[in-house]
Amino acid sequence: EVGALTETVTVEASVAQIQTQSAERAGVVTGRQVVDIQTSQRNFLDIVRTVPGIVYTGGLGGIQANGNRGNQNNFTLDGVNAVDTGSNGGTHTNVNLDAIGEFKIITNSQPAEFGRSSGAAINVVTKSGSRDFHGTGYWFYRHDSLNANTWRNNFEGRARQRRRQNWAGYNIGGPVRLPFTDFNKNRDKLFFFVAQEWQRQLVPNALRNVTVPTALERQGNFSQTREGDGSPLILRDPLNGNTQFPNNTIPQNRITSDGQKILNFYPLPNRPGVDPTFNFQSEVSHGLPVQQTIVRGDYNISDKWRLFSRYVRDARQQNMPYGQWNADFNLPLGPMNFGDPGWSFITNVTTIVNPSLTNEFIFGTSKNVLNIDPTTDTWNRAPLNLSYRMPFQNADTLGLIQNWRFGGVPNAPFTGFNGTPFRNFNHIYEFTDNIAKVYRNHTFKTGLYIHYSMKDQTAFTSVNGNIWFDRDGNNPGDTNWAFGNALVGNYQRVQQSNIVLNGMYRNYNVEWYFQDTWKVSRKLTLDLGMRWYWVQPQHDAADQTSSFRRETWDDAARGILVQPFRNPAGAIVGRNPVTGELTPRALVGSLVPRSAGYVNGLFANGMAREGQPGTPQGLIQSRGIHWAPRLGVAYNFMEKTVLRAGAGMFYDRFQGNPVFDMLPNPPSTQSPTFFYGGLADLANARGVFFPQNVRGFAIEGKVPTTYNWNLSIQRELPSSILLDIGYVGSTSRNNLAIYDYNMAPFGSAWLPQNQDPTNANPQNNGRTTLPVNFYRPYVGFGETRVTCFCTSSNYHSLQVGATRRLNRGLTFGLAYTWSKAQGVASGDGDTLHPTNSRVADYGPLFFDRTHNLVLNYVWDLPKAGRGGNFLDNPVGRMVFNGWTLAGVTQWISGQPDNIGLSIQGLGGADVNRIYTGSENYGPRVRVSGNPELERSKRSQDGWINTSVFAIPLVGSQGFDSAPRLIRRPGDYVWDMSVYKNIPLGAESRFIQLRVEMFNAFNQVRFSDFNRTATFNQQGVLTNLPTQLGGTGGRFGFGAITGTRDPRIIQLAAKIYF
């Protein structure tokens, strides 16, 4: 389009030319490169790594374009949005590579017709039929026997994981004829295109080491049981003064039926005696079947009316042997079914009103559904015939087992059912109308965009309940071992939610624009545009959601907590400060019920709920209509050279997850805790409530905003090479991050009033402090994580692109970016420093990469049999002609990251209290020099300069060292393919045999190193690798711990007709 001010990648087949009529910065990928450059999992998004300014780590959410976050991109399929509005990082549907007709990514200075998101705009256009019938059939194959083993497996002497993948598909398109009629006899009216792809994959999972009950332990015999350090277990009898059970064996009359059934639920050991920290190993791969169907029809109704409709459906089902995010476990006893179907439909009507006026109307809808359910009754209570009952007996309609926890047992078995079954339904409707008018040397364009999203999603609440059998010396029934506690039917604590919550989230975007592409002179083109945004907050249509708001907090109604108290016998117990009643010690810090600040029996002081007077819809204020100007210039000041500049302002529809996270806030659900009792009496137990962690949203509701710009020069060089060099920059405002409003202030753990009164010798140094909930700013709540619109970032880069379209059999593209992305937060979930985020958190962002060089190429090797030489015969031409070499080579700098801190003998909360005086904010290591080692001095045992790190000083406030001060290893990889084309008569008919190699030379590509420094309390670094004189083992501090994929080989066969 004349005057379009964009940085784009477009699928094209023509010879590259300088863009004298536009200001777009264009990295160009030809249609042939889309299908001939190998991509992991046949995912078209992998192509974006060949574009200057892109850092790509996989998937839509792994595209960081010119300093924008990965969840700020927009993906449209044939012009209709297909982004999951929960994370903004996934797509409703995918499109197989052989069905793509056009691929375009706009990363900077988009024209006014592009909106919704502030990052990259990605549009895929599906293929359509044509006058002639054409089609493709294909089969791609991977098998672990073809692949190299991983570096870690080789080190540990383990075999390759089972990894197998098959893709089979076809597409066909052409004209539609009606039998016995003259309809479309000229093949210029109605066309069809159909594509289908089937995937069958075997996906490996990580090795699990678990400690399950032995056959003896299930009978109460713990005589062979060892602690994690190898020492013999002492099993204590709580009914006999905590003396050791004779022979470390529980008498049969003390073993409960339910307890034995719980232990018998788990498999017997398959690796006994190998290691005291585990006795069961599993490494089960799972199937991933996918079926995709695409149907498209194009109809030229008349010379002035054209219509096309397209339907895509993805069907994906996985049986996950170790579960999924809301139902995970470490034993493969019965898989969870993860269903992920999605579909998309669009109708596009284009009208040519007159030679200078056109109208395009688009209606589209897309949807995805995420369902997670058990596949067998393994996880149901009923087959186990358990007799105990939970406090909320009717809360779990699925009848799942409880999440049994065995604290103190190393690598204990666990289940993590939390919002199971899970339901997620995301449906988008969109209407777009674009009008274009050419008048003299102006091309005017205006349009309207309406977006409506529905998102229904299950909240993460554990209605089946959690039962902890952890060892606990304060538990009167404790046996000193979790499996023993389970056998005798004694729990340490229980927690259960009383209701399943399902959010019903809705949002609107209404946007419109005006754009004038003005051909000022033969050499100068201006693009002037404005886009208006009306971005409505995402809200819960059922008015179930609430948000913490400081301005509604009533300090007079702050929570009252059960206090620690030393009774006359000298034992530490709890004490109700209102009534003086004494309680078990475990209840210290629980809430004392009262009327003020409570709603429905739950502490809800400061919680604002949707639907209440004074609370805006979506819990944040609507900011009204926003204006976003766009400007661009293209100046062809000399032959074969053009100077281009563009700038624009962009607003972002931010992700929905921060809204969804607020649904379980009080008073929506009850999750009481029950302490110390027998399973048989659990149904009648009395629960207590502890301060709940809550979420909130800053009520001002600002809209994330990005300003971007570019200045570039483009030059056409000999040999059909197009060179583009430019400066590209951006700055963002109002991006999302999190403040913990209820963080204990720095130094508060040292104050006399915050010391534990049961300690006769308070030290005021963080070692004798009360539990943190006693002295938070808002007593009655735990963490109060509020999403704010409060961070900024900036990006500056030099970008170089060189492309050569097919010339003498060679097509290539080169993309180089030298850049810096800086800010205080890399993602929406980052928690900011409470007092001075600019000083503490500002630095390179996690997706900053200083250098990024990518070369892609497709080279049809010269024909060996030609010109009458000795190979110019049927056999010679068959064997030596028709070969193609293709690939992608990338060199990229490493990711910035942090150095962790650990101090021997102290937990994380202890370290925080002692060094910063705040349990909620930790110190950082001190750094006295450059932590990076010279390249020549790096090794697998020592990747960084560990000598510059020191223990923090007391009084730290997190300013000890810079954030993200070290870089992980960079990456360099050669992905290469060799193809052989076998002709089948006509030029358009041939068979193609392919060998595709990812990491073709099987380079060991380091990905990370041990980034946690451990000191003793005297400040000596102790966890250096053993081979360097430390005690950190083979993978101690500074040693390489991980690598990227080894060589993976993929075979394929395709037929074109």
Image: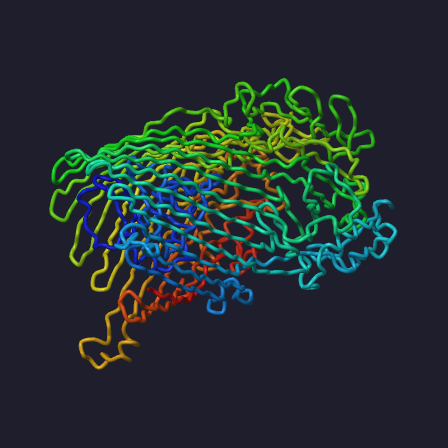
- In the displayed orientation, state which residue is furthest to the bottom: 870
Is residue 795 found left or right of 967 in the rendered image? Answer: left
From the viewer's perspective, is 245 left or right of 409?
right
Q: Position of residue 141 (x, y in %)?
A: 45, 65
Q: Nearer the viewer, residue 388 or 220?
A: 388
Question: Which image quarter holds the N terminus?
Answer: top left
User: In this orientation, does residue 962 appear?
Assistant: no
Question: Can residue 1005 be seen in this snapshot?
Answer: yes
Tell me which residue sits at (21%, 75%) in the image. 866
Picture mark count: 0
Q: Position of residue 928 (x, y in %)?
A: 44, 44
Relative to 492, does residue 968 appear above or below in the rendering?
Answer: below
Name the residue at the front extreme: 180
Quadrant of the rendered image containing residue 705: top left
Closest to the observer, 112 or 1044: 112
| Left or right of 117 in this view: 16 | left
**As drawn, 914 above or below 403:** above
Q: Quadrant of residue 140?
A: bottom left
Tell me the quadrant of the picture where the C terminus can be found: bottom left
Residue 99, compared with residue 1055, is above or below; it is above
Horizontal and vertical percent for residue 236?
81, 49
Taking depth in this image into account, of 957 and 408 the one nearest to the observer is 408
Query: x%, y% of residue 670?
Result: 67, 32
Which residue is painted at 86% across and 53% down in the image?
251
- What is the image's colouring? rainbow
